[in-house]
Amino acid sequence: MVLPFFCSHRVYRVLPLLSGLAVACLLGLPAQTRAQTPNLPVPPQSLPMGVRGEQGVCLVGPQETVAGEAIFSTRPVFVWQGATIGRIELTNVTEGRVVWSGQPELPVPQIAYHSTPLTPGHAYSWTLYSQGGGVLGTAPFQIMTAEQRADVDTALNALVTRLNQEGRTPAEINVAVVDYFNTQGLWSDAITAAVNANPRSPILGRYVLTTRDRICSR
């Protein structure tokens, strides 16, 4: 069974990842014997530029920075920096219709999508609006095909098994997942994993802030 969790993934670089379902299962395990302080993942050097909009807004991700890029998650986390946002709107570009609209909890510049899973293989765009209703910026992205997601999910479950056998704690696993995405250049997947991590982690919170700041300073 495939459950959506993570964000950006280049179609031509399908690599072993860790799914949200796998993480959720691990979080219900008894306390592990191994306890270490995880290191802060370092954002990759290949980070893209943010999508610049009105009033100084910077759309971080998800975004399609290279033709053929797609994201793994069908419930992504949207991250930006800059202006005060009134609402966010999600459009299914393939079908030509708006599928969701939400309001962020100010002043947090991010919002997790928890509605109906997005359709594999479809193209989408997300748009930020000011409190007055004006468009601040739009970024496109695409969901991986069902076949590509299934291949990734198979690899993810294999990784979960290995980490569990090593006796990793939930906190270690969360950081390892983010770091894995990170080292593969899958920065948007790493951000989503960090935002959705349970239990919450100051280390992963710093990773999100660092990545966001680097993308928007380019």
Image: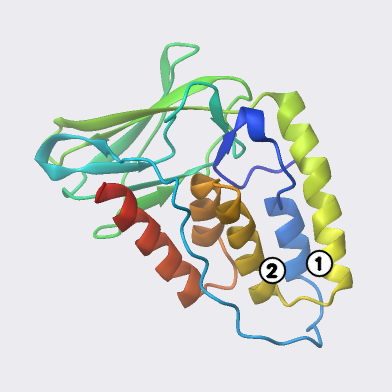
Secondary element at tag 2: helix
Residue 218 lies left or right of residue 180; in this view the side is: left
Seen in the picture, residue 159 relative to 204 is either above or below; the reply is: above
Q: Residues within 10 Å of mark 1 (few under 14, many from 20)?
A: some
Please name the residue that numbered disc 1 is placed on. Answer: 163
Q: Locate the N terminus by quadrant.
A: top right
Work out whether residue 1 can be spotted.
Answer: no
Q: Mark 2 points at which residue?
A: 173
Return the residue nearer the eye: 93 or 202. 202
Q: In this view, does 123 lie above or below 212?
A: above
Task: Place residue 159 in its image quadrant.
Answer: bottom right
Return the residue nearer the eye: 34 or 134: 34
**Residue 167 x, y percent position in the rendering:** 83, 77
Q: Please tell me which of labels 2 and 1 falls first in the chain.
A: 1
Q: Do the residues labelled 2 and 1 touch (CB within 8 Å)?
A: yes
In this picture, residue 90 sits left or right of residue 122: left
Q: Is residue 135 left or right of residue 120?
A: left
The residue type indicated by label 2 comes to: Ile
- From the top left corner, tell me how far across and down residue 212 is, in percent: 34, 54
Q: Is mark 1 on a helix, strand or loop?
A: helix
Q: Which amino acid does label 1 sit on?
A: Leu
Residue 44: where, in percent of width, then height? 48, 54
Visible in this render: residue 57? yes
Q: Distance between the residues labelled 2 and 1?
A: 7 Å
* Residue at 85 percent of width and 74 percent of height: 166
Which of the 4 quarters of the picture holds residue 150? top right
